[in-house]
């Protein structure tokens, strides 16, 4: 079996070893080493990244007891390799995973909520808690307690033992294995069977920030970040706030109120614009009826007009006349869209007409007998499409 150097020293970033076996699976070429400092995906923690002899390691997985290091190109069995770990990624995972242990412990000790799931993502971390909601004051209390424990710089200990020996500690959850138990201990805070990498002391987590929560399958999914990620989140939000302050000349504390006011004004303007558009469509419909060369068949061709606008205009025309058919066509770069309707004074089924003309544009459409819409490919020009419909109607 591969010697797992990451358990002997989580801070080891470089090592030399020999290739024991090679292979290929659905994830690509892989090598199995005599020993490795690369942590494989497991327990909610993603794998390490890095390089072997300069070749990028794209992922590390443990399959049937073997630790597979995935590469773009194959390597030779028996060859020696120099491995280098992406330390920034490794240490980030150490911070997030240890922070999760502390947070889960606080949630259980303070509020009797157990952690049922843990996911270490690329940008944030989440845990699922067996509760239906979280209050703001609860989050504030939990965050303060977690950061207090981090500041105490408690030593993080790990030890291998039997399940029986591990059972003597106040474990948070049932052990997943019955032998070779790796116990991660933060004395007085948390005791957990865990295969992940952790820092030497809680102080290296630096800080935890709870970002918010959502409901998930009857439980709560709590999102947070630790350490360097917290600084990244702070930096991103600070840049965003700075940009907002340049756009809105008000103090930071007044920005939410200003944004609410701007949003309300925007809604009022949108309503005003909709009212104007409705009036314009009404005038346009009257003009179409009055200037139509054939009073019983009114048609118009537009460029890049939306189907929603065609529908509104078609309905407005029907409000002006009850004894005419109307065809409105929007000609686009590679497509034709249309609305075909008839007034209540005419006995016409526009669906029957649409079924006859749609094949000419390889289109689809339908609607009520007096009002249909459709569209398809621009196989013929819009004017030719109008003539086609006119001859059928």
Image (tube, rainbow, N blue to C red):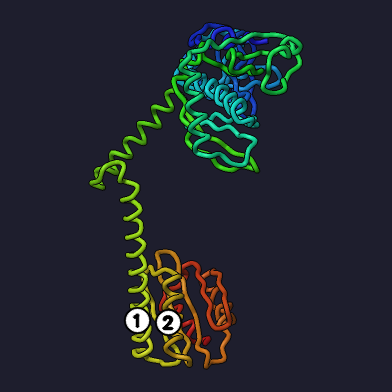
* Residue in front for this viewpoint, 343 or 258: 258
Residue at horizontal 45 percent and vertical 73 percent from the top: 380
Residue at horizontal 64 percent and vertical 30 percent from the top: 112
Badge number at residue 284:
1
Label 2 secondary element:
helix
| Quadrant of residue 262 within the rendered picture | bottom left
Label 1 secondary element:
helix
Q: Write down the residue under mark 2.
A: 316
Q: Label 1 near label 2: C-beta < 8 Å?
A: yes
Q: Quadrant location of the N terminus? A: top right
In the rendered view, tell whether residue 8 sits above or below residue 269.
above
Distance, label 2 to label 1, CA atoms, is: 9 Å
Note whether residue 28 is visible: no
* Residue in front for this viewpoint, 16 or 371: 371
Q: Position of residue 388 (x, y in %)?
A: 48, 82
Q: Please give left or right for residue 55 compared with residue 279 in the image.
A: right
């Amino acid at each position: 079996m591969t010697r797992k150097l990451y358990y002997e020293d989580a801070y080891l970033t470089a090592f030399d070893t020999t290739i024991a076996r090679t292979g290929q699976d659905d994830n690509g070429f892989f090598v199995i080493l005599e020993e490795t400092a690369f942590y494989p995906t497991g327990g909610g923690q993603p794998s390490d990244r890095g390089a072997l002899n300069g070749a990028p390691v794209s992922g590390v997985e443990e399959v049937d007891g073997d630790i597979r290091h995935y590469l773009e190109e194959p390597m030779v069995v028996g060859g020696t390799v120099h491995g280098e770990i992406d330390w920034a990624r490794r240490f980030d995972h150490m911070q997030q995973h240890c922070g999760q242990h502390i947070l889960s412990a606080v949630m259980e000790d303070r509020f009797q909520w157990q952690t049922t799931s843990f996911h270490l993502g690329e940008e944030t971390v989440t845990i699922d808690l067996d509760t239906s909601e979280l209050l703001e004051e609860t989050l504030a209390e939990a965050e303060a307690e977690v950061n207090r424990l981090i500041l105490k710089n408690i030593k993080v200990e790990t030890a291998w033992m039997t399940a029986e020996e591990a059972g003597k500690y106040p474990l948070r959850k049932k052990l997943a294995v019955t032998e070779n138990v790796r116990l991660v201990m933060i004395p007085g805070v948390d005791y957990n069977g865990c295969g992940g990498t952790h820092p030497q002391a809680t102080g290296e987590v630096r800080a935890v920030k709870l970002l918010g929560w959502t409901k998930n399958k009857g439980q709560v999914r709590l999102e947070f970040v630790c350490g360097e990620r917290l600084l990244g989140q702070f930096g991103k939000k600070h840049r965003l706030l700075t940009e907002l302050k340049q756009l809105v000349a008000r103090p930071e504390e007044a920005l939410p109120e200003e944004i609410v006011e701007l949003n309300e004004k925007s809604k009022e303007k949108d309503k005003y614009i909709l009212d104007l558009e409705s009036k314009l469509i009404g005038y346009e419909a009257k003009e179409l009826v009055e200037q139509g060369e054939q009073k019983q068949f009114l048609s118009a061709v537009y460029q890049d007009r939306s189907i929603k606008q065609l529908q509104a205009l078609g309905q407005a025309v029907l409000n002006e006349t009850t004894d005419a058919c109307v065809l409105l066509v929007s000609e686009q770069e590679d497509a034709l869209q249309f609305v075909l309707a008839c007034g209540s004074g005419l006995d016409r089924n526009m669906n029957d007409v649409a079924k006859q003309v749609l094949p000419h544009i390889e289109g689809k459409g339908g609607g009520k007998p007096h009002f249909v819409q459709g569209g398809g490919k621009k196989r013929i020009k819009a004017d030719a499409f109008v003539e086609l419909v006119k001859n059928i109607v």
